[in-house]
Amino acid sequence: MSEALLASEHAGADAVTAAAPATSGARQFWRRLRTRRAALVAGAVVALLVLVALAAPLLTALEGQDPTTYHPGLVDSARGGVPVGPFGGMSAEHWLGVEPQTGRDLFARLVYGARVSLGVALVATFLQVVLGVAVGLTSGLGGRWVDLALSRATDVMVALPLMVLALGLLAVVPSGFPRPVLVALVVGLVGWGGMAKLVRAQTITLKSLDHVAAARLSGWRAVGVARRELLPALAAPVITYAALLFPSNIVVEAALSFLGVGVKPPTASWGQMLTSADVWYQAAPQYLLLPAAALFTTVLALTVLGDGVRTALDPRAASRLRVGAKRTKENGGAERAGRTESLTKTEQAGPTESLTKTERAERAEKGETSA
């Protein structure tokens, strides 16, 4: 009877353990990400920048300014348009001063420029992910000739210089087309090659696994295999690569605007502001430093956050380094402790104890003979 009760108790415990929900992947990801303080700080900075970009109309309404209104009375035309007043015309009405020559409010243009820069990079990254995943999956799951054709097309897109191709495409498009949308489309449609190569390599590795091979042999179509078996496994590398693409797209947009083929005035953009500010770094240094600092902070925060996301999604590299270093330290400490202990024992041992049995026997015989 007691054995039956014990068996029932064990069965109930096993049922409770089986019914207990396992820790979800999102919870594990958050637990790993919380250990990286730099990534958390970078995430907070990125969230603040996104909030500022979304709340740009509200912030400029609180200041009482807008990014396109000219204030000719706030610049000194006799000196070439230098802002009147200290620190580039900073005041209660213009929190960060005004733009040289035009007198437009710098704070308003800076927060609206965040909307353009972040929006263009977001749309471009989305297009690169969608096109790269579609081409990579098709190439990895397709036949020999499909894989060959798509691989060669991907190699061509990767080999083409992004900036040169974007410059050529943006130069021939009519000026009436919305420039931020055009820049996002060009960057997204040109820069998907790296994502496609990554997805193709991962797909070729995953499709040789047993569960994927079983799904293909059971008669599933390629779309079903990709959706049910491959896409969940591809989520981590795709998110990691997208997190690193986002800051690079911000830099590309700023570079195109700086070269004069990106966002055009009066639309505010950090790259476009830097284009106009390159001749004012002595007379009005804040006009150059403010967009440059915003661009640098955004790219740095996104890069650090992307590295943290990569480690949280795939912590094997960091754990291997950490465990290997720990084992090396432990082995080195054990060896040093062993050497120290052996030396201590040798020093503490007497002259008779340190001798071997043969030497002690020989000394004993010599002593008897002499006696």
Image: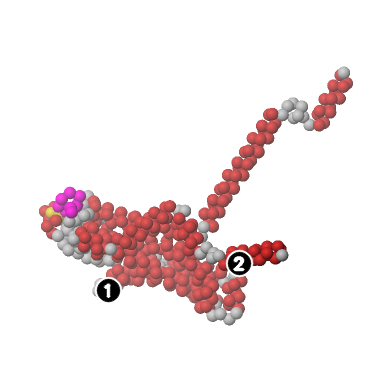
The amino acid type found where label 2 is placed reads Ala
| Disc 2 to disc 1, C-alpha distance | 64 Å
| Picture coordinates of residue 306, whole percent (x, y) | 43, 59
Task: Let me know if residue 151 is in the magenta part.
Answer: no
- Which picture quadrant has residue 48? bottom left
Q: How is the image coloured?
A: secondary structure
The residue labelled by disc 1 is 177
Query: Mark 2 — residue?
Result: 15
Identify which residue is drawn at 70% across, 62% down: 2
The residue that appears at 23% across and 58% down in the rendered structure is 107
The label number, if any, that marks residue 258 in the structure image = none
Residue 223 appears at what percent x and percent y? 51, 78
In what quadrant of the picture does the C terminus appear?
A: top right
Q: Is the stretch drawn in magenta largely helix, strand or loop?
A: loop
Q: Which amino acid does the dot numbered 1 rest on?
A: Phe
Quadrant placement of the N terminus: bottom right
Establish if 370 lies above or below 296: above
Please report the residue visible at 85 percent of the width from the left and 23 percent of the height from the top: 366
Please provide the residue range marked out in magenta. Answer: 83-92
**Residue at the extreme top of the image, as rendered:** 371
